[in-house]
Amino acid sequence: MKRFYQGLAVAIALVFVLFVASRTEYAGAPAGASSNAADTTSPFTDFHGEAPGNVHHITPADLPPPYATKSSALFGRPVARPADVWPQAPAGFKVSLYAQTDKDAPRTIITAPNGDLFVAATNQGKILVFRGITSDGKPEQTEEFASGLNLPFGIAFYPPGPNPQYVYIGDTNAVVRFPYKNGDLKATGPSEVIVPNLPAGPNHFARGVVFSLDGKKMFISVGSHTNVTDIDTDTSEFHRADILVANPDGSDLSVYAAGIRNGSGVTVNPQTGELWTSVNERDELGDNLPPDYITHVQAGGFYGWPWYYTGGNPDPRFPGKHPELKDKAIVPDVLLEPHNASLNITFYEGKQFPKQYRGQLFAAEHGSWNRSVRTGYEVILVPMKNGHATGEYQDFLTGFVLPDGNVWGRPVGVAVASDGSLMVTDDGSNSIWRVTYAKK
């Protein structure tokens, strides 16, 4: 079954690339020339404008009209990282290579209550565990916790707290769980299907999973099947472009929030208990439209897809459709560069970083393709005030794009280790990076 999903995903991806190639104008790899980067008055930029500490703030008033530029395709097939190139963090921070995962491309990373790091090797159908750190900054032990999954992505321990009994996995077609107790490096029993028959890939196959702080509800993110489609007639989008909610045993599955095209990254704010998500918005409306976003998620909220974006802005591909929803479409908390491909998110609750980082949100930006210039390919910091986003975001970990525009790294996951360091997975170079703060 795993080979079926992977083969189907590859086939669909190939068809999609050929489709895009037939419709779009390709930008050459000197991805350097960017009118956005040259225009200092524009809130939109590319990788040239990304550097640790740079602040960005995009508002709904900044959005251009649809089709202000042609739809482009600039894919980021990673090249080998040059020996003298390293991710860049703000002054006072140090970046080290914690693990090289060879053929296992690391994606979601979660810290277990005992400090072990659980990592989804999605394409390989595995869950890996990394334990401890040696004197030279490497894992003390690495094990394969589970294998034979389809396309695992989300990882969550249940019940929340210091002594979980299960680890839940968001596979592409189901939520499953394995028995778990602190310290387990391998699953001690077979997987148990908790939520069967989730709409499976191949497009937007990642399924995020997170529990409410009280452990009473389980949230599951399911991305859309298509870029955009008329969901009044397209039945393939049932229970997609939604965040679903269920009881921990899988019962009472329902839609928690809708119109979220691909919110694969989900977490819960430890201060407020609010659900948050990181969303890949739609393509083919131009370079600077619409913004990807990070937002808290309102129960029963509608976030626009497919009819509207960034509030009540109508998608021109569906003229006149559902005017009754225009005023109900929610403007997200933080607008990001369009096509950033924002993925996993986490709140910083460690004690190693300076105190101003406590309660702030980190997000992994996988990087663009539907843009004539490269954007994303970084880790960002979303400032929070009293548990709520300010609307800005800051570049935190950059340098994954070379000056000539070639890409060597693509951040996917972020997690706070037990010692307060920030762990970052990168499926471009198959690496796990560790960011520490050097106390002065």
Image: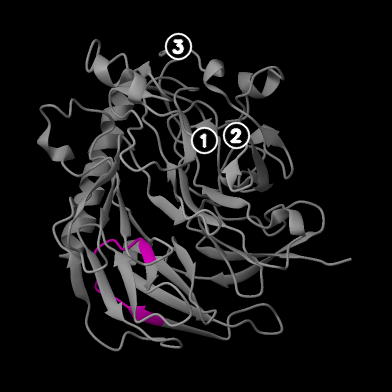
> Which x, y percent locates residue 352?
73, 68
Q: Is mark 2 on a helix, strand or loop?
A: loop
Label 2: how many Cα within 10 Å (few below 14, some 14–19, many 20+): some
Q: Along the polypeptide, which appears first: circle 2 or circle 3?
A: 3
Report how far apart the C-alphas of labels 2 and 1 lie in the structure.
6 Å
Quarter of the figure that contains the N terminus: bottom left
Q: What kind of residue is marked 1?
A: Asp
Instruction: State whether residue 23 appears in this view.
Output: yes
- From the viewer's perspective, is the residue at label 1 or at label 3 nearer? 1
Q: Position of residue 171 (x, y in %)?
A: 27, 62
Q: Tell me the amino acid under the disc marked 2.
A: Gly
Q: Quadrant of residue 147?
A: bottom left
Q: In terms of image quadrants, where is residue 401?
A: top right
Q: Name the residue under label 2.
A: 391
Q: Do the residues labelled 2 and 1 touch (CB within 8 Å)?
A: yes
In the image, residue 252 lies in the stretch drawn in magenta: no
Q: Mark 3 points at which residue?
A: 65
Residue 353 in the figure: left or right of residue 284:
right
Mark closer to the chain start, 1 or 3: 3
State the extent of the magenta-drawn residues as a range: 144-155
In three-dimensional space, the C-alpha distance between marks 1 and 3, rounded to whole angstroms, equals 21 Å
